[in-house]
Image (spheres, helix red, strand yellow):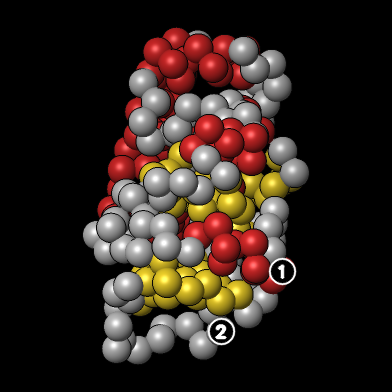
């Protein structure tokens, strides 16, 4: 499932190819990926526009032009990518193909849980993406502590709430809580200053490493490296991992290292 590191990887890949490219033609083979426009409307609004530098906030990818802004939320399986002229197609069934004056912007999405939006101008982006907290990759500790202090529930649902902090998903939150040695069901008001600092430092460490990999990696010594094993054990203490539904998501933690 694409989380912040995946979307940042999409942004960085497109940043090297998309700026300055002019839209020549828009083809949508599956209108089910479009959320607030039609294939015809998308083609008419983007025709002749040149893309600027891609941006990202949380899990949202923003592809601005001098006029409209193309917005992509990849959901679980969405993948926007640039295909140079003459290159082999990596995906047999792209849902959308935007032919440019050089190359193509393509969007593949097997499950179509989210998709593609079009904002008329940059000022209309907020109306589409909704309330978003500070970006998890860019937030400072002071802002992080401030937004967390306004929550009264469990830790993991607070971290997953995009209006609190934008960009974190299920894998990231479990990894961050494990590296910070905090139980994902811990009550947020019970976190002390040292807990909040450890949580922030773990988040920064996990995000920086994950962004380098373009995903949440299953590294040796990480929770994600063992959580899908037949007999998952904590990489720190070898205790059998526990799992439960927390915040509507299946969560993994170590009963020894992450006591409540």
- Between 237 and 176, the one lying in front of the other is 176
Secondary structure type for disc 2: loop
Which label sits on residue 138?
none
- Above or below residue 44? Residue 24 is below
- Above or below residue 122? Residue 46 is below
**Residue neighbourhood size for the residue with mark 2, other residues' Cα within 10 Å, grouped as few (<14), some (14–19), many (≥20):** some
Q: Residue furthest left?
A: 16
- Between 20 and 30, the one lying in front of the other is 20
Residue 3 point in image, percent of width and height? 50, 51
- Above or below residue 31? Residue 142 is above
Name the residue: 42% across, 72% down.
24
Which label sits on residue 32?
1
Secondary structure type for disc 1: helix
Name the residue: 72% across, 38% down.
247
- Between 202 and 41, the one lying in front of the other is 41
Q: Is residue 167 visible?
A: no
Residue 17 point in image, percent of width and height? 27, 64
Viewport quadrant of the C terminus: top right
Q: Is residue 93 visible?
A: yes
The residue wearing badge 2 is: 93
**Residue neighbourhood size for the residue with mark 1, other residues' Cα within 10 Å, grouped as few (<14), some (14–19), many (≥20):** some
Using residue 143 as the reference point, say whether residue 205 is left or right of it.
left
Name the residue: 41% across, 83% down.
90
Name the residue: 67% across, 26% down.
154
């Amino acid at each position: 499932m694409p989380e912040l590191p995946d979307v940042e990887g999409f942004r960085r890949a497109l940043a090297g190819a998309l700026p300055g490219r002019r839209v020549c033609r828009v083809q949508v083979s599956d209108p089910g990926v479009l959320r607030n426009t039609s294939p015809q409307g998308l083609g008419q609004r983007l025709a002749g526009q040149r893309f600027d530098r891609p941006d990202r906030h949380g899990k949202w990818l923003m592809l601005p032009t001098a006029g409209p802004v193309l917005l992509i939320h990849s959901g679980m399986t969405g993948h926007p990518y640039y295909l140079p002229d003459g290159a082999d197609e990596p995906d047999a069934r792209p849902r959308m193909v935007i032919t440019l004056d050089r190359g193509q912007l393509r969007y593949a999405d097997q499950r179509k849980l989210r998709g593609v939006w079009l904002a008329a101008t940059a000022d209309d982006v907020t109306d589409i993406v909704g309330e978003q907290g500070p970006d998890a990759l860019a937030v400072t500790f002071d802002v992080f502590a401030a937004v967390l202090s306004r929550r009264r529930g469990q830790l993991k649902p607070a971290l997953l709430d995009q209006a609190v902090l934008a960009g974190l998903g299920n894998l990231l939150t479990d990894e961050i809580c494990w590296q910070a040695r905090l139980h994902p069901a811990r009550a947020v008001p019970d976190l002390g200053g040292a807990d909040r600092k450890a949580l922030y430092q773990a988040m920064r460490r996990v995000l920086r490493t994950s962004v380098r990999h373009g995903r949440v990696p299953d590294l040796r010594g990480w929770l994600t490296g063992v959580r899908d094993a037949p007999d998952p054990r904590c990489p720190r203490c070898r205790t059998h991992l526990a799992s439960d539904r927390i915040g509507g998501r299946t969560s993994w933690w170590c009963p020894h290292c992450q006591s409540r």
